[in-house]
Image: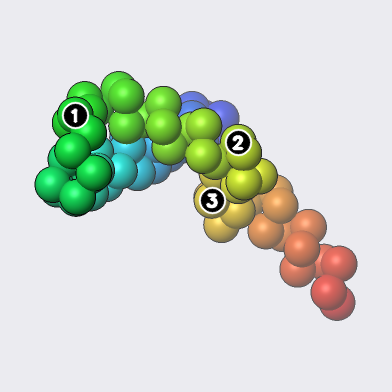
């Protein structure tokens, strides 16, 4: 059950962040740089590419195991 909830949470975060990228891109880039608008799936792909290149694939607060390990390491 926890695995299913985690998968759904990760997918929802990915979809939300893809939507944010799409809205911001379609609002700014066509006007400023005269590039075409992008679709939702292109925005999700762009977000994933940038996340992989910068090393921040997912939000570190989503995974409870990493959060609890971090707390026990600081104690």
Q: Position of residue 20 (x, y in %)?
A: 26, 46
| Image: 31 above or below 67 | above
Which sits in the foreground, 13 or 74? 13
Return the residue at label 2: 52
The secondary structure type at the circle numbered 2 is helix
Could you tell which of marks 3 and 1 lies nearer the N-terminus? Answer: 1
Q: Is residue 5 visible?
A: no
Find disc 1 in the rendering and name its residue: 36
Residue located 41% across and 26% down the image: 45
The residue singled out by tag 3 in the image is 59
Name which quarter of the figure residue 43 lies in. top left
Q: CA distance from mark 3 to mark 1?
A: 29 Å
Q: Position of residue 67 (x, y in %)?
A: 67, 58
Dot 2 surroundings within 10 Å: few (below 14), some, or many (20 or more)? Answer: few
For disc 3, the neighbor class at 10 Å (few under 14, some 14 to 19, many from 20) is few
**CA separation in Å, label 1 and label 2:** 24 Å
Pick the front one: 75 or 57: 57
The number of callouts visible is 3
Sequence-wise, which precedes: disc 1 or disc 2?
1
Instruction: Specify the color scheme.
Output: rainbow
Cα–Cα gap, marks 2 and 3: 12 Å
Which of labels 2 and 3 is toward the front?
2
Q: Determine whether 23 is above or below 1 in the image.
A: below
């Amino acid at each position: 059950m926890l695995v299913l909830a985690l998968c759904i949470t990760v997918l929802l975060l990915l979809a939300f962040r893809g939507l944010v990228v799409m809205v911001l891109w379609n609002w700014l880039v066509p006007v400023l740089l005269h590039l075409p608008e992008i679709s939702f799936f292109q925005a999700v792909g762009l977000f994933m590419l940038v996340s992989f290149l910068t090393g921040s694939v997912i939000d570190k607060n989503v995974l409870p195991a990493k959060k609890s390990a971090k707390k026990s390491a600081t104690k």
